[in-house]
Image (spheres, rainbow, N blue to C red):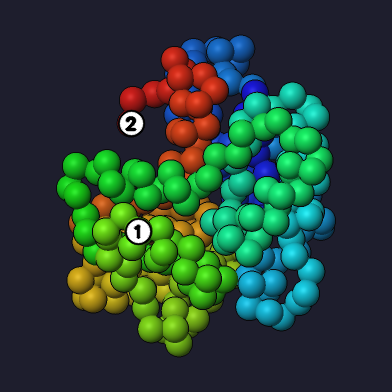
Amino acid sequence: MIGIVGGIGPMAGVDLYRQIVENTIARTDQEHVPVLLASLPNEIVDRTTFLLGKIDQNPASALARVIMLLNNAGCTHVGIACNTAHAPQIFEPMQELLGIMGARVELVHMIEEVIRAIKNHPDQPQRIGLLSTAGTYKTRIYQNLLEAEGLIPEVLEYALHEALPQRAIYEIKAASTNIPQGSIDLVNQAILHLRNQGADAIVLGCTELGMVADRLEMLELPAFNPNLILARTLIARTFPHKLKRG
């Protein structure tokens, strides 16, 4: 059974579940794969706020508790619907806590799967534009993994990053649904800047950005949606015969 750590933000977990449903081969309700979504937003502090040093409380312990709920409910594979939660400063202590707690679930690492998808893409992009939260940006989660694979990360200058994708992400979080066009325009401006810097692909490196992927102007660049990639990986690891062709 698949487990989803949701609530970070709440609609990101819903989006991951939707992606699982849409990528499952099924003709009836009963043919869909079993999924448990644990959404406890009140339990998990903001990941970026922690990573920027504005609070001392590490969300790792709360994340571990949520994963243990899924573990104890019978999930075999778990995905976390948040890019920033995969920062080593959060992910590694969370893994240590899960080991102490005796977790048996397999954690699917969203960002590692995104890098794998980039490497396997037929266009073989080399300069990867990154859109993300400030926490993901500052901790270089994507940059380090991309560089380890010989790829070149392209990021905005930090002030521009704060003014465009960071602002848009928190506007999308606040709206949840009926996302205003102004927020979409901020993301589109960021994509244009990255293309002008030489990016030949874009990672929508925050789950809130993936939620509005169909409204973005990608300027003919391949787009990598981490929630979609995570959803397909979770199906492939648990019920491979149920995975639709990509």
| Secondary element at image label 1 | helix
Can you tell which quarter of the image residue 52 is in?
bottom right
Mark nearest the camera among 2 and 1 is 1
Q: Where residue 162 sits in the image (x, y, percent)?
A: 49, 81
Q: As drawn, is 3 to the left or to the right of 209?
A: right
Q: In which quarter of the image is the C terminus?
A: top left
Q: What's the residue at 20%, 71% (across, down)?
A: 198
Q: What's the residue at 51%, 59% (across, down)?
A: 206
Q: Where residue 209 sits in the image (x, y, percent)?
A: 48, 59
Q: Where residue 15 sits in the image (x, y, percent)?
A: 56, 44
Outermost residue on the left side: it is 123
Q: How far apart are marks 2 and 1 (CA)?
A: 26 Å
Looking at the rendered structure, which numbered label has been put on residue 246?
2
Question: Hey, what amino acid is under mark 2?
Answer: Gly
Q: Earlier in the sequence, mark 2 or mark 1?
A: 1
Label 2 CA crowd tier, 10 Å (few <14, some 14–19, many 20+)? few
7 over 67 or under it: above or below: below
Residue indicated by mark 1: 148
215 over 187 or under it: above or below: above
Question: Hey, what amino acid is under mark 1?
Answer: Ala
Q: What's the residue at 17%, 48% (across, down)?
A: 123
Q: In which quarter of the image is the N terminus?
A: top right
